[in-house]
Image (spheres, rainbow, N blue to C red):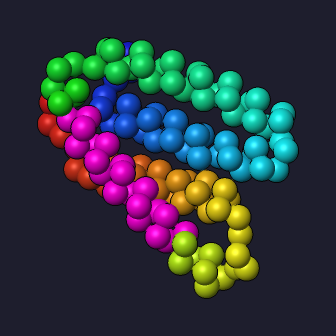
Amino acid sequence: MKAVPTAERVSIMLGLVVLMLSTIPRYLAGGHENRLTMILLALAAVVAVSVMHWRMLEADERQRLPQLLIRFGLALLVGMAVMGGWHALMTDWISWQLFIAHGATAGLLLHVLLLWWRPAVPR
C-alpha cells in the first residue's frame, strides 16, 4: 500500500515545524545545547519531508492546503488561550518561552483532533 500525500498530512507536518520552532527559545534560555542541537536536526528533517510531500501533492490537494493552514492558525490561537488560562489558574507564572511551547503543543493537538473528527472528503 503506497502512502499518498494529502493536504492534511502536510498541514500537520508544518504544524510540527511550528512546534519545533516554538521550543527553540526555551532551550536557548535554559542553556540546553544538546537538546537544541537535536531539535534543530529534527527540524531540518521535518522541513525536508514537508517540502517533498508538498511537491508530491496533486493540484486539488494544494488548493485545500491554505484553508487547513488557516484552521491550524486558529487552533494555535485557541491553544495559546487555553494554556494561558491553565497557567493563570493552576500554576505560578512560568517563563514566556515555556508558555509559547505549551501553547503551540496544545494548538497542534487541537488541529490534529479536529482533522481526525472531521468527515472524510470523498475522492
The residue depicted at 75 percent of the width and 36 percent of the height is 36
State whether residue 82 is above or below residue 54.
Answer: below
State whether residue 34 is above or below residue 23.
Answer: above
The residue depicted at 44 percent of the width and 24 percent of the height is 50
User: How far across and how far down the image is residue 112, in percent?
Assistant: 41, 49
User: How far across and how far down the image is residue 111, in percent?
Assistant: 39, 52
Of residues 7 and 78, the one nearer the viewer is 78
The residue depicted at 22 percent of the width and 50 percent of the height is 119
Of residues 48 and 120, the one nearer the viewer is 48
Would residue 113 be visible to someone looking at this image? Answer: no
The residue depicted at 55 percent of the width and 72 percent of the height is 84
Q: Is 71 on the left or on the right of 108, as rendered?
A: left
* Residue extent of the magenta highlight: 64-83
Q: Is 90 on the left or on the right of 6, as rendered?
A: right
Of residues 46 and 99, the one nearer the viewer is 99
Would residue 14 be visible to someone looking at this image? Answer: yes
User: How far across and how far down the image is residue 74, in percent?
Assistant: 34, 57
Q: Tell me where residue 35 sits by quadrant.
A: top right
